[in-house]
């Protein structure tokens, strides 16, 4: 069950906590030397890399990275990320690894230590009891039960606190947790694979057509490993009959929950994902008025069927995403097809687009890198995506990978809250 929306006094207390934290923060930040700032930047980089290791494994909790370092010698004493299933959290794991050597040292953590009792004790208590002298955080936790309270507890215990180190990087890495708390939905990545002509290939008779090379497909499987759930539409399932698992060596156990968006259940029972539903979970999001016999057959095969609100005979995407947030999903990878991409684009319910595209051949017979302008035009034509910012690009053998993002609204507090355990 999702908890009730925050009461006005909860919101006011959260705002007061953040205001007090900001006032106390300004003085400590001014005292940092350039060398300290450089060291903080480097150590937070390690913490961010640790947090990335846990993506796709810690839902419903965020993947957090923590590092304990000696600022005098420059030694990294310990490092940790949130454990699989979300517990223990990164901070107590790093403290346990450091032991007594943590006393008097500095912790770098990508998200504010929690300050409430859940299924584990507060991480802020562990930090205080470890005798750490300083804590550097990238982000304040938007969870209304934390929201600056953890940092204020550390300050009250005499621990120096520095905030907002590499915050923009941490904000994207932790965005699944942020939007689940503030918008009641998971972080949504749209993954697109286009041919050199800029068009989407279509599978034939249940067999996919590959237009990109091995490196691009391997990167796509890594994205699956870093997702809590992967979603396709009924048409993609019919045309390609995919497994939707991670098939990188050593990462098979990190295959995400598989989600199918289907207004009817025709043909699902014979699909490959249903055949393996008892090995890798399958959730079908459909209308309440579907064939009850087909629904019962899918359930007998191990599929979890959700009745989701429809509008004009189509699944209502806001309701679908809220249902995924309710069952603990924080990161959703949408692999298509075009009608599904267009639906997410129409509602504005996505955060990032990852475009893989085979390189076009110029009129002179040369293979040329894909320009951001051409990529944007292809995405608009094939999926109705507009107004995105190019965030990164990579060359993957004969293919290009471009990362586009929506501009973030820096508003960590809303009236809709979901528990972080």
Image (tube, rainbow, N blue to C red):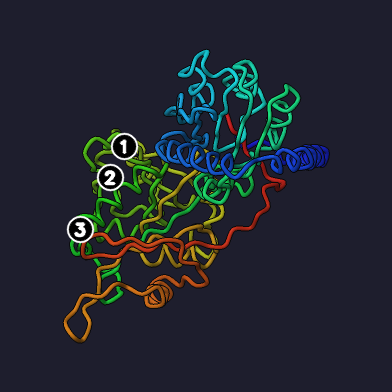
Q: Sequence order check: which comes first, mark 1 or mark 3?
A: 3
State the CA–CA distance, disc 2 to disc 3. 12 Å
User: Which of the labelled discs sits on residue 273, or is there none?
Assistant: 2
* Residue 7 visible: no
Q: Is tag 1's residue or tag 2's residue first in the polypeptide sequence?
A: 2
Q: Nearer the viewer, residue 348 or 89?
A: 89
Q: Are marks 1 and 2 in contact (CB under 8 Å)?
A: yes
The x and y percentages for residue 176 are 52, 45
Q: Quadrant location of residue 225? A: top left
* SS for dot 1: loop
Which residue is denoted by mark 3 in the rendering?
206
Q: Which residue is mark 1?
A: 280
Q: Nearer the viewer, mark 1 or mark 2?
A: 1
Q: Earlier in the sequence, mark 2 or mark 3?
A: 3
Q: Secondary structure at mark 2?
A: helix
Horizontal side of residue 193 vs 134, given as left or right: left
């Amino acid at each position: 069950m999702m908890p009730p929306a925050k009461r006005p006094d909860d919101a006011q207390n959260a705002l007061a906590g953040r205001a007090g934290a900001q006032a106390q923060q300004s003085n400590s930040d001014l005292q940092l030397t350039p060398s300290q700032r450089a060291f903080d930047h480097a150590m937070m980089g390690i913490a961010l890399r640790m947090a990335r290791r846990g993506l796709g494994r810690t839902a419903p909790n965020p993947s957090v990275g923590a590092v304990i370092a000696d600022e005098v010698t420059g030694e990294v004493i310990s490092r940790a990320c949130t454990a699989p299933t979300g517990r223990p959290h990164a901070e107590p794991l790093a403290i346990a690894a450091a032991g007594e050597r943590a006393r008097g040292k500095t912790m770098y953590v990508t998200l504010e230590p929690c300050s409430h009792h859940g299924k584990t004790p507060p991480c802020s208590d562990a930090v205080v009891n470890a005798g750490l002298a300083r804590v550097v955080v990238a982000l304040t936790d938007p969870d209304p039960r934390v929201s600056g309270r953890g940092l204020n507890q550390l300050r009250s215990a005499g621990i120096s606190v520095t905030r907002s180190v590499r915050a923009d990087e941490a904000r994207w890495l932790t965005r699944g947790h942020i939007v689940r708390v503030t918008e009641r939905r998971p972080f949504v990545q749209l993954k697109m694979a286009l041919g050199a002509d800029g068009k989407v290939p279509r599978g034939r008779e249940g067999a996919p057509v590959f237009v990109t090379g091995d490196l691009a497909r391997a990167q796509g499987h890594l994205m699956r490993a870093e997702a809590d759930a992967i979603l396709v539409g009924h048409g993609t399932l019919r045309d390609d009959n995919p497994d939707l698992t991670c098939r990188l060596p050593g990462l098979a156990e990190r295959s995400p929950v598989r989600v199918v968006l289907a207004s009817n259940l025709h043909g699902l029972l014979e699909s490959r994902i249903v055949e393996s539903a008892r090995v890798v979970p399958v959730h079908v999001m459909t209308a309440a008025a579907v064939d009850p016999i087909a629904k019962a057959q899918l359930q007998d095969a191990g599929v979890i069927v959700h009745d989701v609100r429809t509008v004009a005979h189509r699944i209502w995407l806001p309701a679908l995403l809220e249902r995924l947030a309710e069952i603990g999903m924080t990161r959703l990878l949408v692999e298509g097809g075009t009608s599904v991409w267009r639906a997410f684009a129409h509602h504005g319910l996505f955060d990032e687009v990852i475009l893989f595209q085979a390189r076009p051949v110029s009129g002179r017979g040369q293979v040329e890198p894909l320009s951001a302008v051409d990529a944007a035009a292809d995405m608009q034509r094939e999926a109705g995506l507009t107004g995105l910012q190019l965030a990164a690009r990579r060359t993957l053998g004969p293919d290009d990978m471009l990362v586009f993002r929506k501009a973030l609204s820096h508003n960590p507090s809303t009236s809709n809250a979901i528990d972080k355990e």
